[in-house]
Image (cartoon, rainbow, N blue to C red):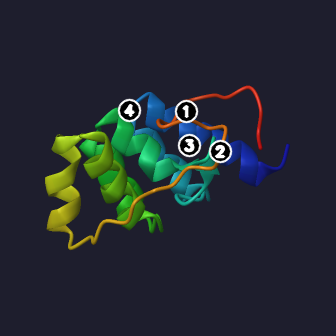
Amino acid sequence: MTTERKLAKELLSAVWNEDAKRVEELIRFGADPSWIFNGYPILVHAVFTRNLDVVNTLIDAGACQVDEALGFALDRGIGEMVAPLAYRGVVPVLHDPKPGYGLYPSRFIAYHA
């Protein structure tokens, strides 16, 4: 497994564990805040967990899918994430996951399309 992918998997686990300090540490080590897992950007996984510290850490580190994250929050009724993202001036874009991944992100999935 490449170091890049390993860091990304560790970042995904830190997001799901809602560990903002570990997310920040992994990004300093070179983890990409825009990595996509299970059809969803890591930022969308963070929005789904509803952890504002993790979301802000990823955005501040340059996560590219901020507009999709706001669209996801609006579409899925995750209201507590809407205001903080909108406050940053984000314009929502509907996230359209690839077929086979479902309507919500998951920590792990059995296959990759």
Local crowd at mark 1 within 10 Å, few (<14), some, or many (≥20)?
some
Residue at which label 3 appears:
11
Quarter residue 17 falls in? top left
Amino acid on which disc 4 is placed: Glu
Which quadrant would the N terminus be assigned to in this image?
A: top right
Quarter residue 30 falls in? bottom right
Give the CA separation, mark 2 to mark 1.
23 Å
Instruction: Please report the residue visible at 28 percent of the width from the left and 72 percent of the height from the top.
Output: 91
Are the two marked residues, 3 and 4, in contact with CB atoms closer than 8 angstroms?
A: no
Residue 11 position in % (x across, y down): 56, 43
Quarter residue 69 falls in? bottom left
Q: Residue 18 carries which label?
A: 4
Residue at which label 2 appears:
99
Residue 63 position in % (x across, y down): 46, 64
Local crowd at mark 3 within 10 Å, few (<14), some, or many (≥20)?
many
Give the CA separation, mark 3 to mark 4.
10 Å
Give the CA separation, mark 3 to mark 1.
5 Å
Mark 4 secondary-structure assignment: loop
Give the CA separation, mark 3 to mark 2.
24 Å
Are the two marked residues, 2 and 4, in contact with CB atoms closer than 8 angstroms?
A: no
Q: Earlier in the sequence, mark 2 or mark 4?
A: 4
Q: Which mark is residue 13?
A: 1
Does 50 appear above or below 61?
A: above
Local crowd at mark 4 within 10 Å, few (<14), some, or many (≥20)?
some
Are the two marked residues, 1 and 4, in contact with CB atoms closer than 8 angstroms?
A: no
Q: Give 51 or 7, whichever is nearer the viewer.
A: 51
Local crowd at mark 2 within 10 Å, few (<14), some, or many (≥20)?
few
Mark 2 secondary-structure assignment: loop
Does 23 appear above or below 102?
A: below
Amino acid on which disc 3 is placed: Leu
Mark 3 secondary-structure assignment: helix
